[in-house]
């Protein structure tokens, strides 16, 4: 069933080349619960949040054509930065959520859970579970920012709204000039929308 895979896959594991060396419209969701039950199964979450499930199914159907281009763009804009502790990562995620979530339409209003899993590659935002899962080597602010961008834009993968969010976060948190991110987006063929 498509719903099952859409729920568990989230945006898919994000594995930009950093790891080698270390279309849809944003409609407001009808309701925005605080957070899902962390012990619920995927099936239970799909039953509890049919609007979010419908959004994920539409997102899968739209696919993710610019995924590789956005990874290359991201790597051209900023370095992945140093490893930070899980406590630092959690704290930074909470402060980022407080700052950015009200400007967006996340599926849930509380900050996402942050889970670090050894023996994994890359990172993923699991929308239905409202959970960011990171490999140990990815506990770095730019990686977390990437997944926060997905949490803030659950209606698309690496689409124009996600790209716009990243440009804002890179400018405000990493001092990457907006004009530079936009110029590099053009070079890489990345679409940038206006939220
Ligand atoms: Zn991603």
Image (cartoon, rainbow, N blue to C red):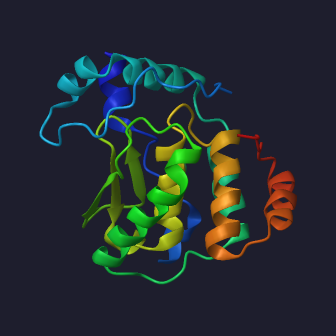
Where on the picture, by quarter, is residue 122?
A: bottom left
The quarter in which the C terminus is drawn is top right
| 21 or 54, nearer to the observer | 54
Furthest-bottom residue in view? 82
Give 104 or 7, whichever is nearer the viewer.
104
| Image: 189 above or below 166 | above
Q: Is residue 106 above or below residue 137?
A: above
Residue 12 drawn at (x, y percent): 44, 43
Q: Is any part of residue 185 visible from this angle? A: yes
Query: At 45% from the left edge and 20% from the top edge, which residue is drawn?
Result: 30
Residue 183 rendering spot, x and y as whole percentages: 87, 60
**Which quadrant: the N terminus?**
top left
- Residue that appears at 56% across and 38% down: 157
Please indicate whether residue 116 sits to the left or right of residue 54 in the image.
left
Percent coordinates x, y for residue 176 in the rendering: 73, 72
Most foreground residue, 97 or 83: 97
Quick check: 78 above or below 124? below
Query: Which of the 4 image quarters holds residue 32?
Result: top left
Is residue 75 in sight in this rendering?
no
Placement of 191 over or under 83, stated as above or below: above
Residue displayed at 57% across by 65% down? 17
């Amino acid at each position: 069933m498509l719903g099952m895979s859409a729920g568990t896959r989230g945006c898919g594991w994000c594995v930009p080349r950093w790891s080698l060396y270390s279309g849809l419209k944003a409609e407001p969701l009808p309701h925005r619960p605080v957070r899902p039950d962390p012990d619920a199964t995927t099936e239970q979450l799909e039953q509890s949040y049919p609007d979010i499930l419908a959004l994920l199914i539409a997102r899968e159907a739209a696919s993710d054509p610019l995924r590789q281009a956005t990874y290359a763009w991201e790597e051209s804009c900023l370095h992945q930065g140093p490893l930070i502790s899980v406590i630092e990562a959690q704290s930074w995620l909470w402060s980022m959520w407080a700052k950015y979530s009200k400007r967006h339409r996340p599926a849930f209003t509380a900050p996402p859970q942050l889970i670090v899993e050894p023996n994994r590659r890359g990172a993923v935002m699991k929308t239905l579970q409202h959970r960011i899962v990171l490999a140990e080597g990815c506990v770095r602010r730019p990686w977390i920012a990437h997944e926060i961008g997905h949490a803030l834009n659950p209606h698309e993968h690496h689409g124009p709204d996600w790209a716009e969010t990243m440009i804002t976060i890179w400018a405000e948190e990493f001092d990457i000039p907006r004009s530079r991110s936009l110029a590099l987006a053009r070079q890489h063929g990345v679409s940038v929308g206006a939220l």
